[in-house]
Amino acid sequence: LISDDRLPYERMITRSRWAKFLPWQHEETARECPVIFYMDGYTVPINTAKASNLFREAAKIIKKHPFGLGQYPKTGSRIRGMASGLVKKGRDTETNINITMTWLEEQPDFKDTCTVYLNRHFGLDPKNPKYQKLSSYFWELYSQENGSWRDQLLWCYVVDKFQAHPVHLNKKIGRMKDLFQERRDQMGFNGHRYALKLDE
């Protein structure tokens, strides 16, 4: 499940993010999958017995988590620094980033020190009502398509706002490379540097 052209969004990336954050709204997926592991298109699960066992263990931990959410934190990152980096690397436009950052700065509960997560890999329980509420709130903001199309900025804020405290998979399970193999040569749009194509 990657994207659905029938979804009422202008940006293709918004349609792809629907499947990423709201898979519980896809009836068959939610029914058949006790835990869902999302990964970006340039990554694959490592096909080893060790990885299979780690995924099973991660699924058990995620099911027990209050929000049914397991992620890898991006150590040392802050929202303002990430926003600036996205523009410098050509991964979003300055205009879009400024719209999102202005909105965030206006929120009384915004904290630049909230934990930033690596959203290219994470696990979730599609039946967890707290995750459903959290992701629905995030989607109400993100799907307006009037700011950054990168999801990390708003996701960091929303996860902190809900005090979700995702289980840190690096502490409970192991390193990302123990579970996922990244194929950087398969990253689209010149390594995700496609800011100029954003609003075409």
Image (cartoon, helix red, strand yellow):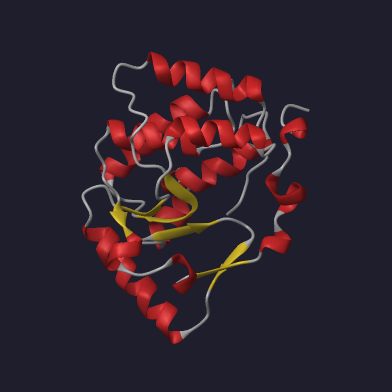
The residue located at (31%, 51%) in the rendering is: 127
Name the spot of residue 121 as percent of width and height, x first: 48, 57
Name the spot of residue 77 as percent of width and height, x first: 43, 42
Residue 132 in which image quadrant: top left
The residue located at (55%, 18%) in the rendering is: 99
Residue 48 vertical position relative to residue 119 in the rendered view, above or below: below
Residue 165 vertical position relative to residue 41 in the rendered view, above or below: above
Question: Camera-side residue: 68 or 150?
Answer: 150
Question: Camera-side residue: 3 or 32?
Answer: 3
Residue 49 in which image quadrant: bottom left
Total labels drawn: 0
Question: Camera-side residue: 187 or 67?
Answer: 187
Q: Residue furthest bottom?
A: 49
Name the spot of residue 167 as percent of width and height, x first: 28, 55
Name the spot of residue 174 as percent of width and height, x first: 36, 70
Q: Quadrant of the C terminus?
A: top right
The residue located at (23%, 54%) in the rendering is: 65
Q: Quadrant of the N terminus?
A: bottom right
